[in-house]
Every structure is written in C-alpha cells, then in structure tokens.
Image (cartoon, grey):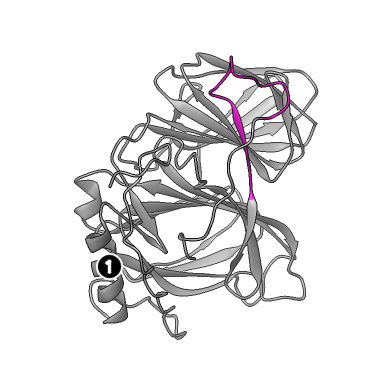
Amino acid sequence: MDRTESLPAQTLPPGVGPTDPGSVLLPGHDVPLGRYTTVRRLLPQRQRRLVGAWCFVDHFGPDDVAERPGMEVPPHPHTGLQTVTWLLDGEILHRDSLGNVQPIRPGQLNVMTSGHGIAHSERSPLVHPPVMHGVQLWVALPDPARAGAADFAHHAELPRWRDGDLTGTLLVGEMAGERSPAVVHTPLVGAQLEVDGPAPATLRLRRDFEYGLLAMSGSAEVDGVAFEPGALLYLGAGRESLTLRGAPGSRLLLLGGTPFEEPLVMWWNFVGRSHEEVAAAREDWMAGRRFGTVADDPAPPLPAPALPTTRLKARDRRGGTLG
C-alpha cells in the first residue's frame, strides 16, 4: 500500500463556510488492497493528515465475498504505528511475527503495536461469512513508544452504553463514563455509534481533542451537515458537545484525540520521522532483518516498492512539509 500516491484536496461540505473552518468533509478514494479487496481511503489526505494520532483510515465493504476469497493480504511489515481493526461483518485471520494467530469477528477488536518493527498478514479464512465490512485504522506512535517492543492484543469484549436512540461501543480511550481495555500511547478515543431511532443524540466531547466522524453505513447529519458512507467529516477541536442525527440502522465511527505534533514521514507501511529512517526500514525488510517471520503463513512476503526518486519529507498534522 504505497502512501506516495496523489491525494485529493479537501472540500467544504454544504452549509459550512469560513466562520466554521474546523468542519471539513473529506471524500474517500478507492485503493486496491491485495488481489480481492478495494478500500476507501479517508486518511491521510493532502491537507488533513491526522485526527489526533489517527493517521490512517481505510473503510472497506460491505462486499459480497460468498464466492470470493475475501481479504488476502500477504505478510508485510510495519514500523512506528498501531493497527486497529474493527469489523461490522465478516471474519479476518490475523497472523504476525510474534507468533500470534487470531481470528477477529464483529464486535471484537485487534490492536497490533509495531514498535520498532513487526510483520503480519490478514486473510479471510477458507470458510468465511458471505459479507465483509469494516475499517482498518493506524495510530501514529510517539517517541519513545515507536522505538519500543512490538505487541499484539485481542479484545473479545468492549464497553457499551446506551443513551436514548444511540448505542455506543468504545474501541479505545474513554467516553460516556466507560474506559476501553485497549492500550494506546497518546490521548485518543474511538467509538462506534449505532443509531436506533430518529431522535437526535448529544455526545459530550473534550475541548482539547480534535474529532472526525465516519459514516460506515446509513447516513448522518451533524450540525446541519449531512454525509453518507465514503466520507469523513473532520470536526476540528474546541467542541464540548456534538449533536447528531442518523437514519435508523446507521453505524458511525467517531475518532478523536489531542493533536499529534510530532512530524511524520508516512510511506508504504512505515511511519517514521525522516527519509533515512524509512529507507532503513525498507532495506531491513527486503534483507529479511528486524521484522521476523509471520507465523503459520506460507505465502512469500510482500516486496516493498522502490523508494521515490525525490527525498521523502516530514509533514506536520495539517500536511505542511518540514524540510
């Protein structure tokens, strides 16, 4: 998955003008993932790279995989990030170079911490449900966690709450008096919001967090701005609450966190701080160093693409280059 591709610019949604510069509708664009899956990439984009430390958002499905293999992503490396996998439908089998072999199903959470380096694969099992639908998220690791040891955690049960016509499931962080068991390294929140009826719902937010809201299914309206699946509504920071409406049956994903101020170089499957750091990770992967071997996966490792001919530049959270 090459991060050097051209990314579309942001556009303002209807009804949001210069008096509300924090709200921006980010349209997704399609990216092939392996041989059989196409995802809608919501982050990063040219002018909005992160929401808190959330630096990567892929939304896939719902796809009919009854007569297809489903997800087929061979062994590949990661540095400097956490992967957060959440399914609405289907099943994926995670394997990694720590020896973990773990299926994930709807309502469960996988969090893999790369630290200095890890490799993993993601595949639908041979016998799998007929529909696949979910999100793959990355969290940028701060110093010194990004240089630490790799780790993996599977959470079969997560905190849930109900408020009127809204049911929440807390993936990471704290919200509505609940705390997720998932370990993160910066102040973050991630929550699925299920709309059960037409009544508007109000969520309490942290003023020091910036937020984004993804419609995974159905439709939603926030502060008079309507959006459909395939777009991420960036909500900015400084909000104490959020009022939303959704069509009954809609499922939304709320992401938030304190703005991540460390500069990032994101290329292929690596999150670093400099061209040299990313180039060293690529060299180690191609030479069979650092990342280990993915357990119980006979497929050959995914080769890294060639580095671009120009130097990779660090970017701030708004997409500005830092030299």
Residue 53 x, y percent position in the rendering: 39, 39
Identify residue type, mark 1: Ala
Q: Is residue 293 part of the magenta span, yes or no? A: no
* 89 to 194, vertically: above or below: below
Disc 1 crowd rating (10 Å Cα; few below 14, some 14-19, many 20+) is some
* 299 to 3, vertically: above or below: below
Residue 12 x, y percent position in the rendering: 64, 30
Residue 92 x, y percent position in the rendering: 57, 64
* Total count of labels: 1
* 300 to 270, vertically: above or below: below
Residue at image location 29% in from the left, 63% down from the top? 278
Specify whether 1 is left or right of 28: left
Specify the quadrant of the image occupied by residue 226: top right
Q: Is residue 16 part of the magenta span, yes or no? A: yes
Residue at image location 40% in from the left, 46% down from the top? 139
322 or 159: nearer the eye? Answer: 322
* Residues in magenta, as a range: 13-28
81 or 68: nearer the eye? Answer: 81
286 or 11: nearer the eye? Answer: 11
Look at mark 1 in the image and give the residue it sits on: 279
Residue 205 x, y percent position in the rendering: 49, 19
Q: Label the magenta part by its dominant secondary structure.
A: loop
Q: Secondary structure at mark 1?
A: helix
Residue at image location 62% in from the left, 53% down from the top? 134
Residue at image location 69% in from the left, 46% down from the top? 230
